[in-house]
Amino acid sequence: MNIPLAPRPLMILGTSSGVGKSLISAAVCRVLLRKGEVPLPFKGQNMSNNAWVDKDGGEMAYSQALQAWAAGLEPKCEMNPVLLKPKGDSTSEVIHLGKSVGIAKSETYYEEWFKPGWAAIRQGLKQLRSFNKNGRFVLEGAGSPVEVNLQKRDLTNLRLAQFLRANCLLVADIERGGVFAQLMGTLALLRPVERSLIKGLLINRFRGRRELFDEGRQWLEGETGIPVLGVLPWLKEVFPPEDSLDLLERRARKVNTEINIAVIKLPSISNFSDLDPLVAEPSVQLNWVELGESLGDPDAVIIPGSKQTLRDLEQLNVSGLSLQIKDFAYKGGVVFGICGGMQMLGRSLEDPFHLEHSTSSNPLKKIPGLNLLPIHTVFEAKKLLLRREVMMTWPEPTLVLGFELHHGKSHPLEDMKGLLMKISEDQELGWGLIHDGKCKIGGTYLHGIFDNGAWRRLWLNQLRREKGLRDLSADVSNHSERREQLIDLLADTFEKYVYLDPLLKK
């Protein structure tokens, strides 16, 4: 398969995971867009439970969707042709070109999935090129490119860089410490043919006066012969996290907030970007509560999505956090679940196809939920992947956008239907429990529900009224506008501190 190489592809490599490759790739996409180019974001293989569903119902990593928006493009699953979704016990669901194709074990992944994965990557490249013949690939690497035990089987770093003859930028995170060792060690482990692809170095997350690193920059350039193209400062603004580990860094408290929301940080949390719009609300403090921690005294509790709903439910029970959540609800607290979080709120769940590898001696047996919402969930073999535009009927009629991504199908219990209300025109999309004329326990299958500005404010205003606070205006833009502002801020900073031109040469 021949893929035209002009303009020359760019690749963002990192000295390790978490150095900022995803956001730097997004910044590069926006900068190239400003230059009049058509950037094509691409990550051959990603491991993440933070997913997005494209318009054709294809599943992809959220980080590549973010890069697509930065590039001014509609996200397409071809931008992330191989997605691994960790399930625990060293297994992952394998997504190729948007569709689930099986379960992989870590010890046999490369023997069984390397060739199909490389075929999916090449097919993704070909399809993206066919859509945008004059575009420039902006490739994001994964982890470190020099894991010596994996290099021969690496799908998405140097193999791809050599295949496309990409100009590579090597990024190191100075916040982690040891930035010189990061860069020198990575370069030392590259073969000469691979090292020749590295056209620039980038120092990320620098605090303080940048001129204090001038001596370090000069030393790096003298020792490596590779230019340091920039020193990016630490940005205080909150950007979407690259993976669930980054959520641990989101513990900074805002000032003058009025609403405190506890979000349960499930062991197998998925689609945590659903909460980004609440992070961006000035009056809201979001507290991520891990197993073993106290729930505290929040104004509301949110249980987000989960890749392993039954296992996470079990861990909630073992840790005692489920008792705290139920006690909070019994005292009149507001609890809201999204997708797997809503399923946990139900009375019972079933996994007849062993999708979550139930270890129960009777896997068909109904598994008790938190019993806060009178619904029953059955996990079906086929995964539902669907973009939605639907009218929410609660708290007030509001048109919203979002997507569904789930195996479970939930139904109200017959004996409790009188106490349940559907929260949208689609009666299978979510429910709320009515008590004393109010709905304080509810949930939805709709990911991205809080992205919708009007609906988010209507939901928050219920919490505010309980505290005697005035309503916030529901006449606000959707979170997509805030996301655009953050991307522009990121690109502005990149343009100010990074010299990109050497990477754009043939």
Image (tube, grey):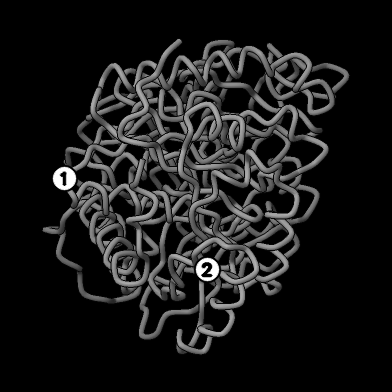
Tell me the residue at 53%/16% (across/down): 120
Q: Is residue 257 visible?
A: yes
- Tell me the quadrant of the picture where the N terminus can be found: top left
Q: Is residue 261 left or right of residue 487?
A: right
Question: Residue 363 at x, y = what percent?
Answer: 78, 17
| Quadrant hosting residue 142 | top right
Question: Residue 489 at x, y = what percent?
Answer: 28, 66
Question: Is the C-beta separation of discs 2 and 1 under 8 Å?
Answer: no
Mark 2 lies on residue: 203
Amino acid under disc 2: Ile
Residue occupying the far left of the picture: 475
Q: Is residue 419 visible?
A: no
Question: Residue 3 at x, y = what percent?
Answer: 39, 19
Tell me the residue at 70%/22% (across/down): 366
Amino acid under disc 1: Gly
Looking at marks 2 and 1 on the same chain, the residue that comes earlier in the sequence is marked by 1
The disc at residue 81 is none
Dot 2 surroundings within 10 Å: few (below 14), some, or many (20 or more)? many
Local SS, label 1: loop
Tell me if residue 75 comes above or below residue 220 in the rendering. Answer: above
Tell me if residue 334 comes above or below residue 435 in the rendering. Answer: below
Residue situated in front as seen by the camera: 428 or 136: 136
Dot 1 surroundings within 10 Å: few (below 14), some, or many (20 or more)? few
Q: CA distance from mark 2 to mark 1?
A: 26 Å
Residue situated in front as seen by the camera: 401 or 377: 401
Mark 1 lies on residue: 36
